[in-house]
Image: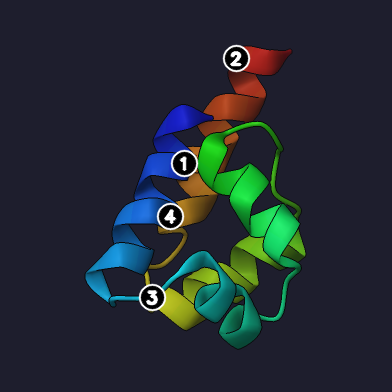
Amino acid sequence: MREFGEKLIKLRTERGLSVKQACQKVGIPQSRLSELERGVRIPTVGQIEKLENFYEAGPDELSELAKKFELHAE
């Protein structure tokens, strides 16, 4: 999950946004975005979609990273 969190941090910092600014624009709680970036929480499908849309990530770019984590967690 660390790789997913690192990707989120990279996308956010490339845009010069704080966690608070990003979560306000994405529409998810600040605590949840922080947990996702630290890799301590698995994102929901809805959160992944919101993040991909906001960051204009490639098709399923974040989804594929999240799937890698889910496979290792089983």
Quadrant assignment, res 8: bottom left
Marks 3/2 in contact by CB < 8 Å: the verdict is no
Q: Which residue is mark 2?
A: 72
| Lower position in the chain sequence, tag 2 or tag 1 | 1
Q: Indicate whether 10 appears above or below 15.
A: above
**In the image: residue 31, left or right of residue 37:** right
| Marks 1/4: CA–CA distance | 6 Å
| Lower position in the chain sequence, tag 4 or tag 3 | 4
Element type where label 2 sits in the image: helix
Q: Which residue is mark 3?
A: 17
Quadrant assignment, res 74: top right
| Marks 4/2: CA–CA distance | 19 Å
Neighbor class of circle 3 (other Cα within 10 Å; few <14, some 14-19, many 20+) is: some
Q: Which residue is mark 1?
A: 4
Identify the amino acid type marked 2. Answer: His
Identify the amino acid type marked 4. Answer: Leu
Mark identifier at residue 8: 4
Q: Nearer the viewer, mark 1 or mark 3?
A: 3
Element type where label 1 sits in the image: helix
Identify the amino acid type marked 3. Answer: Leu
| Lower position in the chain sequence, tag 4 or tag 2 | 4
Marks 1/4 in contact by CB < 8 Å: the verdict is yes
**In the image: residue 72, left or right of residue 17:** right
Q: Position of residue 50 (x, y in %)?
A: 62, 75
Marks 4/2 in contact by CB < 8 Å: the verdict is no
Q: Nearer the viewer, mark 4 or mark 3?
A: 3
Neighbor class of circle 2 (other Cα within 10 Å; few <14, some 14-19, many 20+) is: few
